[in-house]
Amino acid sequence: MKWNWYASKYLPSNFQPNKLISLEMQDIELVELWDERIELPNLKYMDLSGSQNLVTTQIFTGIPKLKVLNLGSVKSLPSKVEMDSLVSFDLSDCSKLKKILKFSGQMENLSTLNLSEMPIKKLPSSIGHLVGLTFLDITNCKNLMGLPSEICNLKSLKKLYAGFSYISPENSWEMDSFKISMPHSVGILSVFGSKPNKSRFWWGLQRKAFVGSLHGLWSLKYLDVDNCGLCYGDIPFDIGCLSSLEKLYLSRNNFVSLPTSIGCLPKLRAFSLSGCQRLQQLPHFRFGLVDNEGFSSIYMHADDCTSLKTLPNLSIKGGRGFVSLSCVNCSGLVENDGYDDSIILGMLWTALDWGLLQVRPSPIPTTPAFQIVTPGSRIPEWFNNQSVGDSLIVELPPCTTWKENCIWIAFCAVFEEGAPLHPDHSPNPLHPLSTNFRIERAMVPARCCGF
């Protein structure tokens, strides 16, 4: 049953919910759902989000099969919840709740818990009872002082989102326990925007100790520490031990350089450093992630790194796929002669030598590509056909083995930086370039594989 925006404070006297399987009543004016205890033996889904006047005490009894419960933005909760069947529990944006309820030891089926945007100062130790929890969201819990050591009991936890959670130094006594409290099962860890305070404490401990606690997270595939105020030394020297890491986001931080081991992450395929305006150099990177079909994708964004002095040297081995390096608005590259044509040419030849740009045999057309965006005002000399304008006519060399080989066309364009196409979503302008190739008098159909 769906009955959103119900305007009365009470339900009709003849309302009989006994046979309901789903109940959705968002943004209602109800004070209470029913006058007395009612058994709802079939109810599995209940969404009462936005119902700020609702007294929720009755909700936690008489519903033995309830799996999904959304109480987002409610103002009151009982002190304890015991719902053995519950799988997903949403308490997001409960801005009036400064203390969270306790969880019983029987809630082993709960896998998703959303506590985002709550003013809570601490999580209850009873969270350790939720041994089946795989997803925990504490994003924007700005008063949260730390994570309890009982979180180490969450052996199934795979995703932890904690962006914009500002931690004060009052809970620094948890420093020693935190290193053992991060479950090794975590595959996604996001703490973007969690800036330290003036005492350099972060998550209730020194920042370096927190990031250092990533050691041993063998399942970690996604790490987001964007805009966390990280400085030189805050990234551990052995971050390269995160053998499963595929996506790493370090944008808008304050470090000058990075540990060399970061370039040895064996499965890294997306790396963002955009907006790190103090960053002067990058370590050499050796990418080699290849999927089961031999296809690889590598995205590296270092836009707005205005102090960057040299381009990174990307060593690409194995696979076929897409390589993208973006250094838009890196003015330091031009000022320090860091824009070296030979580096770009070397990376392109390496990609060709390792077969990265081979066409992937698949029923669905693929576009293997190699693209780099850097500051500059000229086209490298090794582009032997150059023209001013939007078109170019080139005579192709003869090719007799079309079935086994193809001709690769590399092109370069100089364009003026403009305003962002989507200023509300991205601080950097997008630079889409579209190309069309027409081969006249060709003996076989042409296939454009992109660049």
Image (spheres, rainbow, N blue to C red):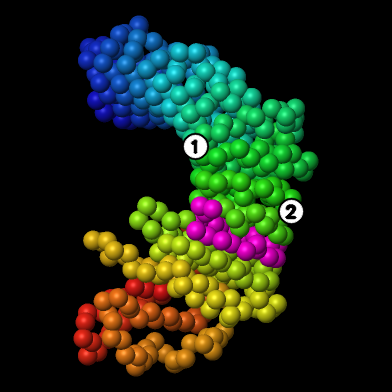
Label 1 packing within 10 angstroms: few (<14), some (14-19), many (20+): many
Q: Write down the quadrant of residue 320 in the picture.
A: bottom left
- Predominant secondary structure, magenta span: loop
The quarter in which the N terminus is drawn is top left
Dot 1 and dot 2 residues touching (CB under 8 Å): no
Q: Name the residue under label 1.
A: 159
Q: Distance between the residues labelled 1 and 2?
A: 27 Å
Instruction: Give the magenta-colored segment's residue range.
Output: 266-288
Specify whether residue 284 is painted magenta.
yes
Q: What element carries label 2?
A: loop
The three-letter code of the residue at mark 1 reads Lys
The three-letter code of the residue at mark 2 reads Tyr
Q: Residue at x 72, y 43 (%)?
A: 208
In the rendered image, residue 242, in percent from the top left (x then y), is placed at: 58, 45
Which disc is residue 220 wearing?
none
In the rendered image, residue 329, in percent from the top left (x then y), is placed at: 59, 71
In the rendered image, residue 288, in percent from the top left (x then y), is placed at: 50, 58
